[in-house]
Amino acid sequence: MKILLKNKMEISKYDGIIIPIYEDKLKVDITEIPLEQLKESNKFEGKENDLYKLTILEEGKLVEVVLVGLGKKDKLSYRKILNILGESYRLLKNEKVSNFALVLDANNVDSNEQLVRASVESFIMSDYKFDHYKKKERSSEEPKVDIIVNEIDKYENIKKEAATIALANLISRKLVNEPANILNPKTLSKEVEHLGKEKGFEVEILKLKEIEKLGMESFLSVAKGSDIEPRFIIMRYIGNKDSDQILGYVGKGLTYDSGGLSIKPTSGMVDMKSDMAGAAAVIGAMCAISENKLNTNVVGVIAACENMISGNSYRPGDIINSMGGKTIFIGNTDAEGRLTLIDAMEYIVTKEKVTKVLDIATLTGAALHCTGAAASVAISNNDEFYKKVNESFDFSGEQIWRMPVFDEYKELIKHHEADLTNTAGNPGTITAGLFIGEFNGDLPWVHIDIAGTSLSTKEKGILSKGATGIATRPLYYLAKEQQK
């Protein structure tokens, strides 16, 4: 998609126009539109999420116009802007309009940083569709968007950053959407190497023998049921050599999860190519961080493997060790993500010397019972760090909700035969996170469970059906905040 900023427009040059309008100041200056009649007939009142499409004749040319209701200005959130602009773009796209303008400086709307940023991110993300494997004729025409603003120079850098971040979200979506017969630990590691060279971050890939030398028995226990060897992926971006602060990201990288010997039903396995959405979020964020050359230091790690079934599979009832030296009783082989994450956590804390750490994972089905698909779930040991994480999600238009951590929950992860158990029971989302937290080295830490938010069942707002790329943009903004 080609997006340009312009301070002038001629309507007849476009096939379509998007006009955002506030409810409390209903007017359009650039062309004749019967707003009063639309309001009287309740077809368009400028209320939040109002959308109305009409066709006008401008200098002998038919132009599709989408009126976008923003509601009251003081109640407009970034999340709402993203989604309503995504829906407005989709209306034009369905009409085969590929050359259009978004009018920010006219009518009752003045351009500002938030609107420009949201416009760029929204149009790029809502244009995405995963149909790579469908045999069909593809349109060669690239969508072209002009955003009409008052001062081009004022917003040019904002536009560039927003485009980079939105494209990073699409990198994450594509990785998650790829089927497991295409994307496995080996091909994922090669893709990260390619992205590192393209975007400018360092990549180190550890293979089986190197992983064994590190003593990552917990990670390897999950991996050994598959014929495809695991990979431990390390991504480093050092943008500020004068700082000793390093932000650590740990992403769950199960490229496929059958459940192991505690096998899932077929219906539960269909979408398990998405069990590496945490890893994808970290990869996408590292791309944007590096491409925008942030003045900060970030290290991301991924323990990539498959959880499969064979004679080598680990079993319920096994007791295994971990890189951190704590033993684990295996109550269920489908509680595997936390086993890979603890060795990744131990590694990043002890070997990469990070000063704060965040892990992100499609970890528990229980997360859906906490917040559904509306928000990701979090737990943390540090109020200040969590506040920064929460702000980065809010700034991105994504939602997160913090769970309580009581002493009673910490007792549940202990086991009478081993130091820990991987099946502590309810509240499952919290106990799973606390299990990982046993290996954070007492650093400021946030755990994010995206099991309910990593996939979308339908096309809506900025989301396409399938992977959402959730948390990619918040992780970028969290790293950007660390520059200060």
Image (tube, rainbow, N blue to C red):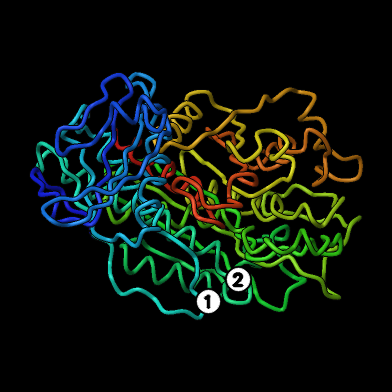
User: Pointer 2 and pointer 1: residues touching (CB < 8 Å)?
Assistant: yes
Label of residue 8 in the image: none
Q: Is residue 111 visible?
A: yes
Q: Residues within 10 Å of mark 2 (few under 14, many from 20)?
A: some
Q: Quadrant of the N terminus?
A: bottom left
Mark 2: which amino acid?
Answer: Pro
Q: Indicate the secondary structure of the residue bearing disc 2.
A: loop
Q: Quadrant of the C terminus?
A: top left
Q: Indicate the secondary structure of the residue bearing disc 1.
A: loop
Horizontally, is 268 left or right of 123 in the view?
right
Q: Which residue is mark 1?
A: 133
| Front in this rendered view, residue 166 or 150 | 150
Tell me if residue 276 comes above or below residue 134 in the rendering: above
Instruction: Give the alpha-carbon distance from disc 2 to disc 1, as whole Å.
Output: 10 Å
Tell me if residue 393 comes above or below residue 329 in the rendering: above
Q: Earlier in the sequence, mark 2 or mark 1?
A: 1
- Who's the residue at 86% across and 64% down the image? 261
Mark 1: which amino acid?
Answer: Tyr
x and y percentages locating residue 228 in the rendered image? 67, 77
- Who's the residue at 28% across and 67% down the image? 142
| Front in this rendered view, residue 347 or 291 | 291
Q: Which residue is mark 2?
A: 179
x and y percentages locating residue 53 in the rendered image? 35, 44
Q: Quadrant of residue 452?
A: top right
- Who's the residue at 71% across and 67% down the image? 223
